[in-house]
Amino acid sequence: MEMRTAVPESVDPAVRSRLGDDKSAAIARLTEEGKVTRLRRTSDDNKPYTIGFWTANDQVEFRQLIEQLPMYPWMRITMRPLTSHRFDPSRMS
């Protein structure tokens, strides 16, 4: 999924900092639970965004997981379900 977060500038800097810490803790917990497998940062026209690989049984579970993130109200999410590829190196061995 692609995740673009834009916390308004009007949010107090201390609150923004706490949101970042809380997001980090939430991602760590979801990683331990096996729900987040990869996060990558990229840039699109100097507007960075995150690409994440998540594990969920369906879109309902995925939405429940994403809603646990403290910055969820300011996130724009694009979900693209993936399936395996026959030439995936992990399947070739």
Image: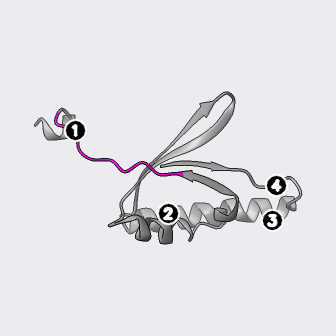
Q: Nearer the viewer, residue 63 or 7?
A: 63
Q: CA distance from mark 4 to mark 1?
A: 39 Å
Q: Secondary structure at mark 3?
A: helix
Q: Residues within 10 Å of mark 3 (few under 14, many from 20)?
A: few
Looking at the rendered structure, the number of numbered marks drawn on it comes to 4
The mark that comes first in sequence, 1 or 2, is: 2
Q: Is residue 15 left or right of residue 36?
A: right
Q: Secondary structure at mark 1?
A: loop
Instruction: Give how far across and how far down residue 30 sits, in percent.
Output: 45, 66
The mark that comes first in sequence, 4 or 1, is: 4
Q: Residue at 76% x, 59% y: name it.
A: 17
Q: Residue at 44% x, 65% y: name it.
A: 62
Q: Residue 11 is drawn in which quadrant?
A: bottom right
Q: Nearer the viewer, residue 1 or 22?
A: 1
Q: CA distance from mark 3 to mark 4?
A: 11 Å
Q: Nearer the viewer, residue 90 or 74?
A: 74
Q: Residues within 10 Å of mark 2 (few under 14, many from 20)?
A: some
Q: In the drawing, what numbered circle is on residue 15?
A: 3
Q: Nearer the viewer, mark 1 or mark 2?
A: 1
Q: Is residue 58 left or right of residue 29?
A: left
Residue at label 4? Answer: 8
Which region is colored magenta?
Answer: 78-86
Residue at label 1? Answer: 85
Q: Residue at 64% x, 63% y: name it.
A: 72
> Is 82 one of the magenta-colored residues?
yes
Residue at label 2? Answer: 28
The mark that comes first in sequence, 3 or 4, is: 4
Quadrant including the C terminus: top left
Instruction: Give how far across and how far down residue 43 sits, in percent.
Output: 61, 32
Question: Disc 2 residue type?
Answer: Ala
Question: Disc 1 residue type?
Answer: His
Instruction: Give how far across and how far down residue 63 sits, in percent.
Output: 49, 67
